[in-house]
Image (spheres, rainbow, N blue to C red):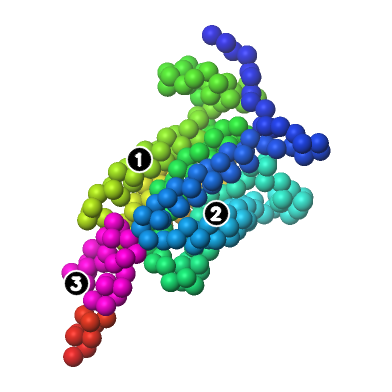
């Protein structure tokens, strides 16, 4: 067995005085893939490429800002002591929940402005965002962060992990749970499940892919967060576990809300945007009849 520590260099390459980190490259790669897949799926559901590209143009930077501000907010004392480090995002410290909240606000604004059904848009986005999250966790791997508590090398070997992962989990002479890997695998399983379900005609109502994402990610993050040693806290509670419970509740609420309709039934995901005019007409006629 090789017990030599061979941590991966977090710097991918240098351009003069500028260092380009693996963390940033991995995050960007996940984002680009998510945009590509969203454009492809959006066209099948009647949403134009221009709308998706323009939305992504604003969502990505604002999402990154939101992810950073969320993290800084819960580590405020540290960053107030050295404010310039707020901008050192290559060191890590992007809270995914902050990015999701900020990105969702942009998607909401753009959808309302361009008259695109919000839940259809989030349904299209959800599996791709989850895939980007699965990829992004490998940036945490490179930075040797978002890990769990201390374990033995034998424990990691029993998981049949490749040597490069085991060695990267050797931090200052101790081995740690690869919590990043647990979440990445959990997210990938969720992506596969959502991809399969969304292909089924007349199965999922609009909003239920979004709900599936919220519930799946919320459940996985709740338990994996309990392993981590770098959690953000609100009093004695882990912030991400609190948010996870809220997301699970929202996801279940969406399903209950959509399924309570008998008539007019909300459109299925596979109906795409084409059904929108007919649904709006039926809904208006239904409410007019109930007024009488």
Q: Separation of disc 1 and disc 3 at Cα?
A: 32 Å
Q: Is residue 223 left or right of residue 171?
A: left
Residue 8: x and y, percent?
64, 25
- In three-dimensional space, the C-alpha distance between marks 1 and 2, rounded to whole angstroms, equals 23 Å
- Nearest the eye: 170 or 29: 29
The tag on residue 260 is none
The residue shown at (31%, 73%) is 277
Q: State which region is magenta.
A: 258-283
Which mark sits nearer the N-terminus, 3 or 2? 2
Check disc 2 and report the residue beneath it. Answer: 99
Cα gap from disc 3 to disc 2, whole angstroms: 36 Å
The quarter of the picture where the N terminus appears is: top right
User: What predominant SS class does the magenta segment belong to?
Assistant: helix
Q: Identify the residue under disc 1.
A: 192
Label 2 neighbour load within 10 Å: few <14, some 14-19, many 20+: many
Precedes in sequence: disc 1 or disc 2: 2
**x 64%, y 23%: residue:** 7
Q: Is residue 226 above or below residue 125?
A: above
């Amino acid at each position: 067995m090789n017990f030599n520590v061979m941590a991966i260099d977090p710097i991918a390459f240098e351009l003069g005085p500028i260092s380009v980190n693996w963390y940033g490259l991995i995050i960007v790669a996940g984002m680009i893939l998510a945009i590509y897949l969203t454009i492809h799926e959006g066209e099948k559901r009647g949403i134009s490429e221009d709308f998706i590209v323009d939305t992504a143009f604003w969502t990505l930077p604002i999402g990154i800002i939101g992810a950073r501000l969320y993290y800084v907010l819960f580590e405020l004392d540290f960053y107030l002591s050295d404010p310039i480090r707020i901008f050192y995002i290559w060191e890590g410290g992007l809270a995914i929940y902050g990015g999701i909240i900020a990105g969702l606000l942009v998607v909401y604004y753009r959808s309302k402005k361009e008259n695109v059904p919000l839940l259809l848009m989030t349904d299209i986005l959800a599996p791709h965002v989850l895939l980007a999250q699965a990829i992004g966790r490998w940036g945490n791997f490179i930075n040797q962060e978002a890990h769990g508590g201390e374990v033995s090398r034998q424990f990691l070997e029993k998981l049949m992990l490749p040597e490069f992962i085991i060695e990267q989990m050797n931090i200052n002479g101790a081995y740690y749970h690869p919590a990043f890997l647990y979440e990445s695998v959990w997210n990938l399983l969720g992506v596969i499940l959502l991809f399969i379900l969304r292909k089924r005609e007349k199965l999922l109502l609009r909003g239920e892919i979004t709900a599936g994402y919220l519930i799946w990610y919320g459940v996985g993050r709740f338990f994996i967060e309990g392993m981590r040693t770098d959690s953000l806290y609100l009093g004695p509670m882990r912030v991400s576990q609190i948010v996870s419970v809220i997301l699970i509740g929202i996801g279940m609420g969406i399903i209950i809300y959509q399924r309570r309709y008998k008539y007019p039934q909300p459109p299925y995901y596979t109906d795409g945007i084409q059904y929108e005019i007919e649904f709006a007409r039926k809904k208006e006629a239904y409410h007019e009849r109930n007024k009488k």
